[in-house]
Amino acid sequence: MNKPTLISFKLCPYVQRSVITLLEKKVDYEIKYIDLSNKPDWFLKISPLGRVPVLQVGEDVLFESAVINEYLDEVSPPSIHPESPLTKAKHRAWIEFASALLVDQYFLTMTKEQAEFEKRKGEIINKYKQLEAILPEPKNGALYFSGDRFHLIDTSYAPGFMRFAILQSALPELDLDKDFPKVRTWVKTLLSKESVQKSVLPEVPEEYIRYIKDHKSYLGSLLK
């Protein structure tokens, strides 16, 4: 496998999914950061949707985190995707659910209206309720999506969980998983993993809060 280059915006949760996968798979890679508010021409030429992450492998380019992660999993055994076609398909479906949760999170942080903030907060809590219903019981105080083993799907939830933890550290009353013990254990398990902790730069928590405040959103007005 050629040494890949991951094109990143350091606050992007979708990029973080791929970084976690690269670290879990112990792939030697390079990372190149860009400013999404001032996208360079070379990036626009290789990114059909103008979004990150983009993975460059030699002369080839991949985009969309789910596609990138499946590629990395396939070329760097052993696989962390389920072997069963049905279970694998179910995981892919719940990865899409994770992306919908990230959309809710984004609008929660960016909306300037309290009513929209409360609406998104309710939708996030409802998604947590759905996750709580399908998660297995924890074992020895730890939990992943499928039980006691880390899978590719876990990389899709960890970035959102990390951002909610950052937000809660600045606004303790924003404790969205308090009524969902299995989700809470899953969050704790993922955020304790070295690959998750090392998947962002040290300055990201502070910059994430500043990014929200700078957009003068409703949530930004509440943050300390």
Image: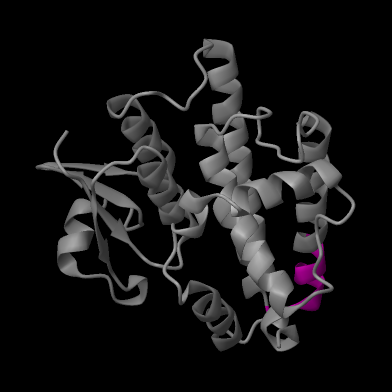
Q: Looking at the picture, how far across and down is residue 55, in whole percent?
A: 26, 47
In the picture, which quadrant includes the N terminus? top left
Q: Nearer the viewer, residue 36 or 71?
A: 71
Residue 102 visible, this angle: no
Could you tell whether 205 is left or right of 118 in the image? left
Q: Is residue 30 above or below residue 219?
A: above
Q: Is residue 116 magenta?
A: yes
Front residue of 71/50: it is 71
Q: Is residue 96 magenta?
A: no
Magenta region: 112-119
User: Above or below — where is 145 with respect to 11?
Assistant: above
Q: Residue furthest front?
A: 140
Res 107 → quadrant: bottom right
For residue 38, what is the image quadrant? bottom left
Residue at 81% x, 53% y is: 125
Q: Position of residue 203 (x, y in %)?
A: 46, 77
Image quadrant holding the C terminus, namely: bottom right
Q: What scheme was used to colour the molecule?
A: one colour
How many circles with numbers are drawn on the protein?
0
Name the residue located 71 percent from the left edge and 74 percent from the top edge: 169
> Viewed as shown, does residue 136 lie left or right of 109?
right
- The percent position of residue 171, horizontal first and vertical second, equals 76, 78
Q: Residue furthest right?
A: 179
Q: Residue at x 76, y 38 (%)?
A: 131
Q: Main secondary structure of the magenta part?
A: helix
Q: Is residue 36 visible?
A: yes
User: In x, y percent, where is residue 106?
Assistant: 60, 64
| Residue at the image position 44 percent from the left and 48 percent from the top | 20
